[in-house]
Image: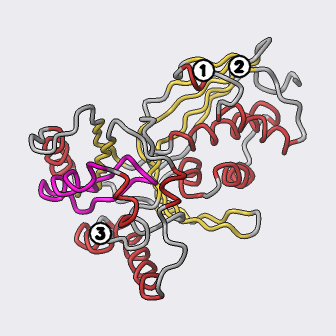
Amino acid sequence: MSAALPRGVRVRVPATSANVGVGYDCLGLALDLMAEFCFEPADELAIDGCPERFRGEDNLAWTSYLEACRRLYQRPLPLHLHIDSPIPLSGGLGSSSTCVVAGVVAAQLLHTGGLDPQAALDVACELEGHPDNVAPALLGGLVSSFVDGRSTRSLRFDVAEGLRFVAIAPPYEVRTADARRVMPQSVPTEVAVWQIGHCVAAVHALATGDADLLSSACQDRLHEPYRSALIPDYEPLRRTALAAGAAAFTISGSGSTMLAICDGDEPAGRVLAAVEGMVENRVNGLWVRVLPARSHGVEWELA
């Protein structure tokens, strides 16, 4: 490496929630729960800090780094990669997207000394397959995206400060492939019209903190009716969260994590207590956290 380039980099990437109910494959928001990745040149590849099954050459942060290097026409370096992530692996909070974003960002920083956000977004989107998780991980806030050819176009919005997001992750996974498989191949025009109107309203509600509008807007007809069947505890958890004061309840990404959206800390605390205190239909091993939205996306520190 050139002497002007960093010797290593620490990359911190926020958890994300995709779809936000009615924004299938286009909406996502960043949450204040950070995964940290440390990349340091080494004699050979070494990965630690994560479960053993992710420590090989197929590690997603490593393969994303390799692909980003290829696109930069740079020779990849053998690296020591340390991962410290509190994001549950059951799916739905962007655990895979954090790896993709970290690898792409690390490649740019280690080999060019700087970050090109649009180029990083385009590469990360291609690697992930859709922009709803990687865009808010890079940009923070609430992001609406679409792919135009090979370029990803993203619009970022601030999330109202008072909103809180209760992330509820059961101790089992929903495979993304299964969640895609249960989706219908086509939908009636009336469903498409319903989604468009409700998606626009949901964006406005999240930006303004209008909990009443959010409650009406987050009524998905496109994917949640099908995907909820893949989450055995969806219905009792939804009923409990809404009865405790959540304004809206959505599947986060393709699941199994769910998100109860609340108007402030007090109702969020009630929802958390109600979900953790369930007696009937109790879910053992449930992971529950109250999270604010995160206004900033990926951050890094050069060594």
Q: Nearer the viewer, residue 171 or 296?
A: 171
x and y, in percent, of residue 209 in the image: 30, 64
Label placed on residue 82: 1
Number of other residues with Cα within 10 Å of mark 3, as a class: few under 14, some 14 to 19, many 20 or more: many
Give the amino acid type for the residue marked by disc 1 in the picture: His
User: Mark 1 or mark 2: which is in front?
Assistant: 1
Q: Are marks 1 and 2 in contact (CB under 8 Å)?
A: yes
Residue 26 in the image: state x and y as whole percent.
54, 65
Residue drawn at (76%, 63%) of the image: 150
Single out the residue that lies furthest toward the top: 43
In the figure, residue 224 lies in which quadrant? bottom left
Q: Quadrant of the C terminus?
A: top right
Residue 40 tag number = 2
Instruction: Tell me the magenta residue range.
Output: 232-261
Quadrant that contains the N terminus: top right
Query: Helix, strand, or loop for circle 3?
Result: helix
Q: Which residue is mark 3?
A: 214
Helix, strand or loop under label 2: strand
